[in-house]
Image (tube, coloured by chain):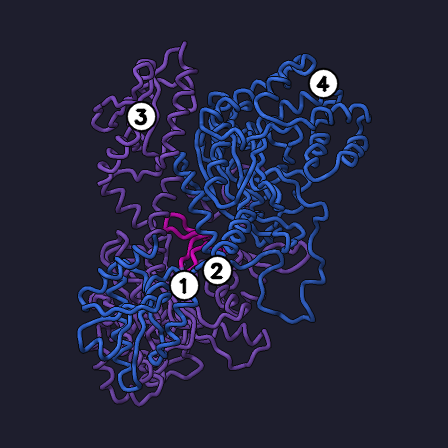
Chain colours: A blue, B purple
Amino acid sequence: ELRGESASKEAEAAPKKSKKKGGKYQPKTPLGMRDYHPEEMAVRERVFDTIKGVFKRHGAVSIETPVAELKETLTGKYGEDSKLIYDLADQGGEILALRYDLTVPFARYCAEHGVETIKRYHIARVYRRDNPVMTKGRYREFYQCDIDIAGEYEPMVADAECVKIVTDILGGLDVGDFLVKINHRQLLDGIFAVCGVPDDLFRPICSAVDKLDKTEWPEVKEEMIRKGISGEVAEKIWGYAQQKGGPELVAKLLEDEDLCANESAKAGLDAMKLLFEFCDCYGVPANRVSFDLSMARGLDYYTGVIYEAVLVGAEVGSVAGGGRYDNLVGMFLAKKGKKKDKKIPCVGVSLGIERLFTVVANRQKSQEGAVASRPTEIQVVGIATSEDKQEILRERMKVCSELWEAGVSAETSYKASAKFMTQVQHCEKNAIPFAVVVGKSELEAGKIKIRNIVSKDEEEVPRDQYIARLKELLAGSSQ
Amino acid sequence: ELRGESASKEAEAAPKKSKKKGGKYQPKTPLGMRDYHPEEMAVRERVFDTIKGVFKRHGAVSIETPVAELKETLTGKYGEDSKLIYDLADQGGEILALRYDLTVPFARYCAEHGVETIKRYHIARVYRRDNPVMTKGRYREFYQCDIDIAGEYEPMVADAECVKIVTDILGGLDVGDFLVKINHRQLLDGIFAVCGVPDDLFRPICSAVDKLDKTEWPEVKEEMIRKGISGEVAEKIWGYAQQKGGPELVAKLLEDEDLCANESAKAGLDAMKLLFEFCDCYGVPANRVSFDLSMARGLDYYTGVIYEAVLVGAEVGSVAGGGRYDNLVGMFLAKKGKKKDKKIPCVGVSLGIERLFTVVANRQKSQEGAVASRPTEIQVVGIATSEDKQEILRERMKVCSELWEAGVSAETSYKASAKFMTQVQHCEKNAIPFAVVVGKSELEAGKIKIRNIVSKDEEEVPRDQYIARLKELLAGSSQ
């Protein structure tokens, strides 16, 4: 579900029969789409906050584009995956489709508005009529979280910043050990040329290489032969594709005379050398980056460095993917009648946010029990008899409004006759740390009782001092 | 574009001819949809933060639902506005449509998941194939921001909290003077009955009353007569509909014997009395709330209190709308085969966020010039010759990474040969307050120069102390 990741092979529309069960409508979400419940939203918000924090530290701005694009904007960008695009009905007017990713809308945005330099992030949902497998987290509607840097710049500086951003984000989230794999399309093309792959088979062979992370070599080799190269050529490619490492691997390959005689391979290797150097300048830990010659990414539009991030030991697939794509905006500019060769070089990366949600939620669950979705800090609890319950209700509402005024999040039961213990249990269930207790006797004494929900300790405080005291307690409890 | 607001009368699909101009594709957004640029996103984020802050203070949780719903979920909910629903193409599988508002998906959510009590907010975009008028801010894709409280509760407590939430939000945003108009559907029905409107004309007459904020009485009266009541009956309604005020108006109407003989009118008035009392308990300023008998809201599903907020003296229409709808979730529960009479009473309000963006952006523009969209605090500026520019570039990257590590947002030019003054001008243009200057002489002296972009003051600081000094300066400049 990441940028540059191919759709599932079994991809196809849901069978027509699922349309109605016995002709009876049931309130439900569409197939492959889902509701996010409050607990999930709480995790999501925390993950988004971490990610946005990193983006902002890097001075990125954000944009938003429509959920729908002209169908023609999407046409010819996704190869055979185009069949997964959700079309809108033709109700008169333009022919529209739901966005398939955030990269093509970004390129359209730059072309439409004449934006030549921008560092922007975009967090939004995209749509694919893929065969949904909910248990594997494969949905038809899912979040992507992209950052892209557009502009004519010094080689590899922005490319290295993308690696820095991904390592900062994954390091900032509670996801455990991770690795950013890097490679270069020009190097791959050079390797294919040197191994004897004909030019017109570069992309098909590249897409076969891309499968090496999930598929054993013999099977990939078969695919290569089927696609038109000899077993000998395939084995040569395999000789390169198995290699992975750090700057020392770049140095070693730069000594490979056959390889470096190829202009494209040499350019790719020089770029990788620079990328490692710049990653070091940016303080990226060396053990987080792996030059991996088997990593190829599915999408056709990459023209330079490519990235993929994986969690070590987690079975969730890759959690980030991207690369440099220098020609995509130009495709739109040409449509706009601009100079044919006008380019807006771009590099960017897409975070697999749904997979990150899953990992973060699971780790938090195992560490600290239920994740609190309710931000309430104080529950205003009443003690009332059937005679004074209306009076106490009004008093509770006043106390709530005092707390809100003071910037404290507070709630009170909407029922006049709520029982004391029911109200306290509500606090326990929803991880509300403190209750403020309002009853006839406290009212008459001009006091308010504060109850610590966990310890059950209670203290009485004068009415004009309880907010200050609560703030002290809240500050203490959050430490 | 608010909840309960009727679609424009001239609503119709865009003419087929606009599909293509001369058959040539241009990169553009779909008709009636638009991109949000970084400056707009900055305003949007500030507005959202204020609103979410209020929601959280009230202990609300958030949910997200799919952008598409089963077409049948939306069917029969919007009356004649149903023609504005965006359908997805039938590509095999379920028949889907884009959500038209957030209220029906919320009701579907409660019914599907068996949620009987929740206080949730939802900020998301909705879709209407209305005739777009961009200059008036009427789009086909626009944000709604809803809060709803579901559950069987003490009468009017949750209803009053909705008023409190709206006044807190509008008071917290920079939108000037505002007024929350309130009325009650049962009171309106009672008035219609007392005036002599036949039962089956209640809704059509109610929708005529709803037009009184934009249309003069004689025209509305004509509509009423056309809809089947006499001029005399219409004038009686007008006698009531002109009245507006505070709790004293409720008291006055409670003395109207004809009116109070009607059960529905009496129930409505008792509710309004309680609402005013509870608003007072919640600390809602009395001058912010107006009991307005001409306010009726368009949607059919309201069953109790109705709200509408307007900015005084601003020509943007209403900025919030909502009310109580006790039967909507039940419609879905009945489909699910639950007990026929099962109800999940709900009350909620929808903020007209696009209108609020416009007002906030305009006020901020007039007050403080351009709104900074770029969160960058520090620009790392290089002074380099053609000999040392590569070295200085790497040094700039290292300094950036030190600043990021310290949690400071920082950027540096992606060009090795960026000129000093170009870099400084970039800071001025983007409201970046400070620059850190890195040059050969500073490097050799083990120092870093800090430049205040506005005052042009410069100071040299030892390399190991510049971050602490910058944090001091940033803390000072934000005060």
Residue indicated by mark 3: B464
Mark 4 or 2, closer to the camera: 2
Which chain is mark 2 on? A
Which chain is mark 3 on? B
Circle on res. B165: none
Labelled pair 1, 4 in contact (Cβ < 8 Å): no
Residue indicated by mark 2: A370
What SS does tag 2 mark? loop
User: Please, what is the three-letter code of the amino acid marked with disc 3?
Assistant: Asp
Q: Residue at x 69, y 53 (%)?
A: A13
- Asked if badges 3 and 1 are on one and the same chain, I answer no
- Residue A65 percent coordinates (x, y): 47, 44
Query: Residues in magenta?
Result: B121-145
Q: Quadrant of residue A205?
A: top right
User: Please, what is the three-letter code of the amino acid marked with disc 1?
Assistant: Ala
Residue indicated by mark 1: A431
Residue indicated by mark 4: A194
Residue A38 lies in the magenta stretch: no
Residue B143 lies in the magenta stretch: yes
User: Please, what is the three-letter code of the amino acid marked with disc 2?
Assistant: Ala
Q: Of residues A243 and B139, which is closer to you in this image?
A: A243
Which chain is mark 1 on? A
Labelled pair 4, 2 in contact (Cβ < 8 Å): no
